[in-house]
Image: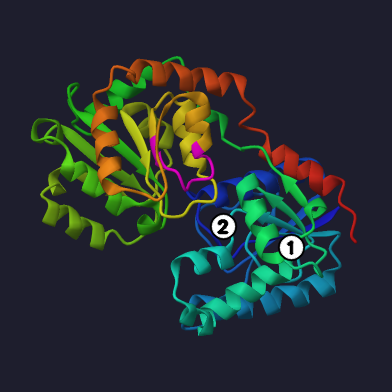
Amino acid sequence: MKLAFCLFKFFPYGGLERNFLRIAQCCSDRGHSVDVYTMSWEGPKPDNISITIIPVKHWNNHGRNEIFIKQVNKLFEQKKYDVVVGFNKMPGLDLYYAADPCFVEKIYRTKPAIFKLTGRYKHFAKCENAIFSTESKTKIMVLARSEQEKYIHYYHTQADRFHILPAGISLDRKKPSNADEVRSQWRAEFNIKNDEKVILMIGSAFRRKGLDRALLGLSSLPEELKSKTHLIMIGKDNPKTFLSMAESLGVSEQFKVFLGRDDIPRFLLGSDLFTHPAYSENTGNVILEAIIAGLPVLASGVCGFAFHIERSKTGLVTPEPFSQQEYNKQLAYMLNSSEYSSWVKNGIEYGMTEDLYSRPETVANIIDSFEKG
């Protein structure tokens, strides 16, 4: 088939972007032609996929999105694709990969009513409605049943238009046989002693992922434990605000930010605890990546994949509504808990017994069997 894939921006270290690329390559491997349309692309380009970059200029994000959407929809009409797959919300899609949470639900929950008068709200609400309204024929691939329920509540979307996808974790995140050697080399490289602890965070949009919450948690640790604990953040965002926050909290010496890495498995094996105290998170693939690497996890209950922590018995979930005080207590407990070895063991076993890897193939199967309405 002749397929079009749409993504506003490609960044090689984002969870959505990595899943997008694996799905596109899986479709290409099955013999389909895949044309990708995006406003920007960072990193190497695969040989088996056609990538068209549509440069757009506007002073704000939703303005750029509007221009991009108009241009790609013209191309869709001209090129007569069998299936158009979108990884961001926009009109004109046959299939939508729903990695982002329900926008309208989030605004009702977190913003004053006057926000609905803004251009930003009108743009994103219109794009969401184009996919989820009862008049739309777009089929929807959701990553968590909880998000499906939100869309049905706000848009009355027909239930038979949804596909629930399994997780799509890369196999290189599983704990390898030489994990101890990798851990020792990694800690030596970053000058981290054996009796020191490393808390790891991974994700772009530092504020939304809860980096401020993690810094407050680090600063609240008992003095002896705090002096031997490091916090590492890996992702794409401006770290200036958080570096200043760490300075004001007196933990700047223990805090490091890396703006994207290709060696994430090494960080998972070298660290002692993964934390994801997000304010908003549709799923949280990084939670599962940590679990199958044998790294215990502390995450906020808002994360769609937080249930995996409880099901696998690999750490703790901070209940909603989020309490910083409760998170601080859990963080201190997990760093010195007698349950630690059980959490590690349970995570490795969970990675061996659960289907956490087949999302790209499942999406390709949905595309293979797709029929336009």
Q: Is residue 146 magenta?
A: no
Residue at the image point whose x is 71% and y is 50% from the top = 141
The kind of residue on which mark 1 rests is His
Residue 129's place in the image compared with 210, above or below, is below
Q: Residues within 10 Å of mark 2 (few under 14, many from 20)?
A: many
Q: State which tag comes first along the sequence, 1 or 2.
A: 2
Instruction: Work out how far the residue at label 1 is from the one at label 2, CA to CA, in angstroms.
Output: 16 Å
**Left or right: 209, with 85 as reference point:** left
Work out whether residue 213 or residue 56 is closer to the camera in this orientation and state it.
213
The kind of residue on which mark 2 rests is Pro
The location of residue 310, given as percent across then percent down, is: 48, 30
Rendering colour mode: rainbow
**Left or right: 21, with 263 as reference point:** right
Magenta residues span 298-306
**Left or right: 288, with 186 as reference point:** right
Residue 91's place in the image compared with 138, above or below, is below
Q: Quadrant of residue 359?
A: top right
| Residue 12 in view in this figure | yes
The location of residue 358, given as percent across then percent down, is: 68, 34
Residue at the image point whose x is 55% and y is 23% from the top = 351
Q: Which residue is mark 1?
A: 156
Q: Which residue is mark 2?
A: 101
Residue at the image point whose x is 31% and y is 51% from the top = 211
Q: Secondary structure at mark 1?
A: loop
Work out whether residue 84 or residue 227 is closer to the camera in this orientation and state it.
227
Work out whether residue 218 or residue 147 is closer to the camera in this orientation and state it.
147
Numbered label attached to residue 298: none
Which quadrant of the rendered structure holds the C terminus? bottom right
Q: Secondary structure at mark 2?
A: loop
